[in-house]
Amino acid sequence: MQTVLANDGLLPALGTGFLDQAPVLRPAAEPRLGTRRTYEADAEVFAEGDRSAFYKVVSGAARTYKLLSDGRRQIDAFHLPGDIFGVEAGEEHRFSAEAVTDTKLVVYRRERGALTSDDGSLAREVVSAMMRSLERAQDHMMLLGRKSAKERIASFLLGLSERVAQQGTSLDLPMSRADIADHLGLTVESVSRAVTQLERDGLIELPPNRRAVVLRNAAALRHIAA
């Protein structure tokens, strides 16, 4: 069976008293709804050093990144519909964020007492999202430290496949190869070579004139990624 795929910092460890000790977050408007905002592709969501808020992706995709001292960009994560991002331990953002495509977000700002004043559903959603982000960040750290370009691409494609969880449906890839390169610690040329090799091996298919990927042999990709 083939799978059709669309083209994804470490958070602080959470103790048992996380909700009592962490900075409390409050939606910008209503406690349950927040404020909905629309961002065009490549528009800034927040900059490093901005006052901390957190965001939920309704549609589209966002990337969080840091510019290194030599001008290079390191994308730490891609955030897809349903993801929550921007939760920080301090009062300022340590990363910057941009919309990858035209994107709709729900924006929540921090204010003491908000999460603990409702029925706890938003708090549980935030904590669950943070745990998923932490797991992906740990996987990403291992990927950058131990894997070849081909292995990194295979892992990236499989990870996205699991996140979108839509088999048999063709989805456009929100991120460019330059984005993928900056996320995986590769050059654009290395990404292109690895993708071409996977296509030649019959493991993936790249539909013409479309930013999409078809995983033709997920088992073989998992073998490479491992």
Image (cartoon, grey):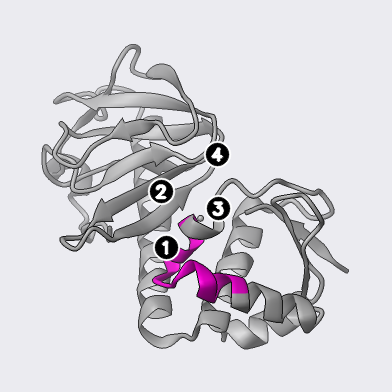
- Which residue is drawn at the image coordinates 13% and 39% (left, top)? 49
Disc 2 from disc 4: Cα separation = 15 Å
Q: Which residue is mark 4?
A: 81
In screen coordinates, is 186 left or right of 91?
right
| Nearest to N terminus: mark 1 or mark 4 | 4
Amino acid on which disc 1 is placed: His
- Which residue is drawn at the image coordinates 43% and 77% (left, top)? 143
Q: Residues within 10 Å of mark 2 (few under 14, many from 20)?
A: some
Q: Which residue is mark 2?
A: 128
Query: The N terminus appears in which quarter of the rendering?
Result: bottom right
SS for dot 2:
helix
Q: Are marks 4 and 3 in contact (CB under 8 Å)?
A: no
Give the number of the mark in front: 2 or 4.
4
**Which span of residues is magenta-colored?**
179-192
SS for dot 1:
helix
Q: Which residue is mark 3?
A: 176
- Asked whether 87 or 156 is in front, the reply is 156
